[in-house]
Amino acid sequence: MEEAAHIEKIAAQAGLLVLLGPLVTGFVQKLKARLQCRQGASIWQPYRDLAKLLRKGTVQSDSASPFFRAIPVLVLAATVTTTVMLPVLWASSGPALLPLGDAILLLALLALARFLCAIGALDAGGAFGGMGASREMTVGLLVEPALMMAVFSVAVAGGTTDLVHLAARRATLPALSWQAPDLLALFAMLVLALAETGRIPVDNPDTHLELTMLHEGMLLEHSGPGLACIVLATHTKQIVILTLVAALFFPLGLADGSAPGALVLAGLAFLAKLLALAIFLGLVESSYAKLRFFRVPQFLGLGLVCAFLALALRIL
Amino acid sequence: MASSLLWLTPLLSFAVGLGMLLVRDRRVLATLDVAGSLAVLGLTLAITNRVVQAGPVGALGIFRADHVAVLFLVLIGLLAVAVSIATVGWMRQELARGHMRAERLHYYYALVHGFIATMLVTVLADNLGVLWIAMEGTTITSALLVGFHGDKHGLEAAWKYIIVTTIGISFGLFGTVLVYGAAAHAQGGVLAGAMNWSSIVAVAPHLDPGIIRIGFIFVIVGYGTKAGLAPVHMWLPDAHSQAPTPVSALLSGALIKCALFGIIRFHTIARAACGPEFSQGLLLIFGLLSVVVATPFILAQHDLKRLLGYHSVEHVGIIALGLGFGGRLGTYGALLHVINHGVTKALVFLVAGDAIARYDTRDMRMIRGLMGIAPLAGTLLLMGALSLAGTPPFSIFISELMVIQAGLAAGRTVVVAAFLVVVVIIFAGLIHHVGQMVFGTAAASASREREAHLPMLGMLLLVAAMVLLGVYMPAGLDRVLARATEIIIG
Amino acid sequence: MSVELATRLIDVLGALLLFSTLLILASGQLFRAIYAVAMQSVFLGIAGAVLGAATGNPDLWVIAGITIVVKAILLPWLLIWVVRRIQIPREIESVIPINATLALAAGIVVLAFRLSASLGPVRQAITGNALPVGIALILLGVLVMAARRTALVQMVGLFASENGIFFTAMAVTQGMPLIIEIGILLDVVLGALVMGILVLRVRSSVDTDIADLENLKG
């Protein structure tokens, strides 16, 4: 019985995040459009785009290997698995939601997804694929250590890398026991969130001009349902990152059991945090121009230094 | 009565400076200048008299004059007078050559007296915060003076000067804050008195040594920047060479000594709090570094005033070495060197200014045969250079000898050996440079104007002091120095 | 306000001060650096107010207010006025690449915290992390001055250093005497004015930035 209940919870959480992902993207698009004084597409447009892609057929490059067909599915699988390692609505100090994984596994799965995308792009043999892949991996090289350090600085204080337990512990402390390293880690995470979600000033998610793409460059060779899988994975990754920020730094309103009242409250809190972070993304995207690629390391360097200092100050 | 002298002295100088802003006539300005300086010297001598007879005197809770302070006070007063007298002739030449514009004259004089006023406050301050504020005040006024001519080199020098010294004494401020924190902690809470040097020294043995150590490091880097200790001395040759000559004399002769005064005050506290080895060790390192670093630049120098600037770095290093060797002899020698070097360096700057005006160049390779066309100036330059190099019978020889003796007594033979090598090299270099300048035949382009003897009075005054201290130590001075030494080493 | 809460708030404000200094180091444009130092001064003023509430010392409120007015409004406005007046190129040239500067900055902050962790019980005299943050800020200000070639950015670095000193000074036991703090602020303003004058005078006679002049050598 316990197992069944747990599997239900897992499926529910995964489904919730996967389904909400495109909505977040749609919301950010709408916000940007409004800030630019135009109507913009509706917030449900990403769903329509996914449906359209699923209806289409697949075209594959001649030079791609059979493994190429498997990549979109693998990427989606990796990303969806990360959705259940986060405290979204539930955070109990009891046994974990099936010992599925902690923060390290989460970051590793995201890195795996990125790696698979890059491999696929190189496999297809196109020039833009290669360029996008190399740029994306460069960004990944800078972002992943910083992300690890930021997460660790919070984990060191909480005494565990399991995000659910971490959130549960911090939720009970007065004023969430915020300290100086937490602030630095938050700044670092906000900078890195921009990089991980592929937004301005690191990457432009709306463009399909070859020379300005990082992430989009890797997706050029995919089509049809494969592309739908990868696009869905991108949406999911975005919402996972945002939920990670919310769970690490604002673990408020998380339910402790299955009481319906607590769940509703937790759901509202979660939506509020998502909304705030989505507004942050939209505002940043509208306020800045995309950085030239050789300036991206400087921008990410700031995030790296903040994350490093957060960890160092925590240990010292 | 005596305590009001303390705040009256800088106030007078400041008031003279303000008053000068209203005057336009050149002669009136010059008279006010000399009169103001003479008054300042008189007041400092009065304070000295009072301190010698009846001990340290305080005023308003923020000023205090003890035996250490009066040494610096009299030095400032003496240099102010000598510089004012020399400015009379110098200004006339500058106006004639068009380097100085008549309508900006009063700004210059006002700034000079403001500068002197801030230096006086620095030396008279008991409150460490007031000491810092006055030190920053000297930076601001002298930066405007360094860049007074407005040419590219002058402005570059002024910029480097103000940026480097401001950031430097900010370090000093941080050190002050740390010392204040330690003192307040030791006294269990804040008191206005916790910023006063006299109260801090009284509780010094109870201060936490760790924080005093960090504080002293910040102080010696900070105030050391202002004093011209290597490796933060970079601004000094630029600023002292680009400034108008009387200002250079004041900068090299008095200002860097005031910065050393600040270091000495903190050195006393640090000695009592963490034992003498720490602060003396730091002073030794900085002193030796300054002496060694200055040497190659002195040898390879072409610009006369830059040469003198590097020379100031070297001598500040010698003073730091004296304090670093410690003990009665070292400290006495260091304090004596403060006076000796101040007097001699100001003299040499003033004479050099005269020579530069005559030949219209600062390049030493162009200056030849000074003795032939201006015998008095040539003699003075030769005497000054010999003195700077440490030759008897001039005063610097005595104080350098004391420092060396102190070093040997403290067992630092390696440092002393290095020091001696450097001194010999500098001696050779200096004599070579000055000998070439003074002897030989002058070029035709040099001005053969007859020497004006009245402005030379200022320089003669300094020469007299220089020679006097070289052959004879007045008993009064000896007592003051001894008492000052006691105050420092506790 | 309890001591515990005050220490917590000072810690958070210290982190904000550090972050704004990192922003100064990472900024490639003059205006960003100026806004960052203005932001830093605002945080400093808030810290003063927090300490004033915690210790009950009214002087600290006055200092907080004056800090915000002078260092967050007046001095940045002065800098921006100079920039607009003489049309300086807005890009900041750096002697050391930005990433290397940021790496050095990380090292300096770690060093500062290590240094203050080695002190003993006297650490209690200074609230929260004001001492290591103060040391870090001073050294980072010097780093800004050493690593950048634009005169106005060097002034920004100077202001950042002074903010660090003020932060520590305000947190020492019950703050330094009011007169001294006002005197120091006055000196900073006068110094900034003189520097501004020098920058303007160089601009009017020579067409380079004053920090770029390198004629005096040897």
Image (tube, coloured by chain):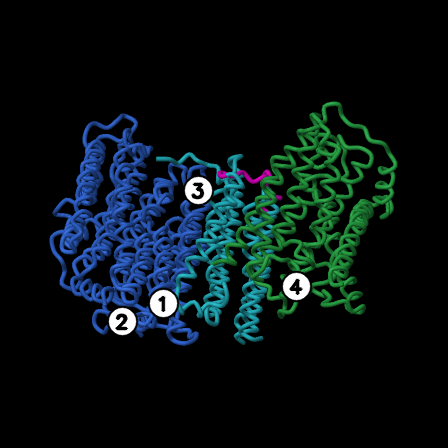
Could you say which quadrant of the image residue A113 lies in?
A: top right
Task: Give the image location of residue B7, x and y in percent.
Answer: 36, 68
Circle 4 or circle 3, nearest the eye: 4
Q: Secondary structure at mark 2?
A: loop
Name the N-terminal-most of marks 2 and 1: 1
Query: What's the colour of chain B in the image?
Result: blue
Magenta-colored span: C82-96
Circle 1 residues within 10 Å: few <14, some 14–19, many ≥20 = some
What residue is drawn where x is 72% and y is 39%? A204
Q: Which mark is residue B56?
A: 2
Can you name the residue that lies furthest to the top here? A62
Residue type highlighted by circle 4 = Pro
Query: What's the colour of chain C in the image?
Result: cyan
Q: Secondary structure at mark 3?
A: loop
What residue is drawn where x is 76% and y is 56%? A13
What residue is drawn where x is 43% and y is 50%? B106
Q: What residue is disc 4 on?
A: A95
Kindly check if marks 1 and 4 are in contact, taking CB atoms under 8 A apart as contact: no
How far apart are the two marked residues, 4 and 3, measured between alpha carbons?
Answer: 86 Å
Residue B337 inside the magenta-drawn segment:
no
Q: What residue is disc 1 on?
A: B8
Image quadrant occupied by the N terminus of chain B: bottom left
Task: Give the image location of residue A229, x and y in percent.
Answer: 78, 40
What residue is drawn where x is 45% and y is 38%? B151
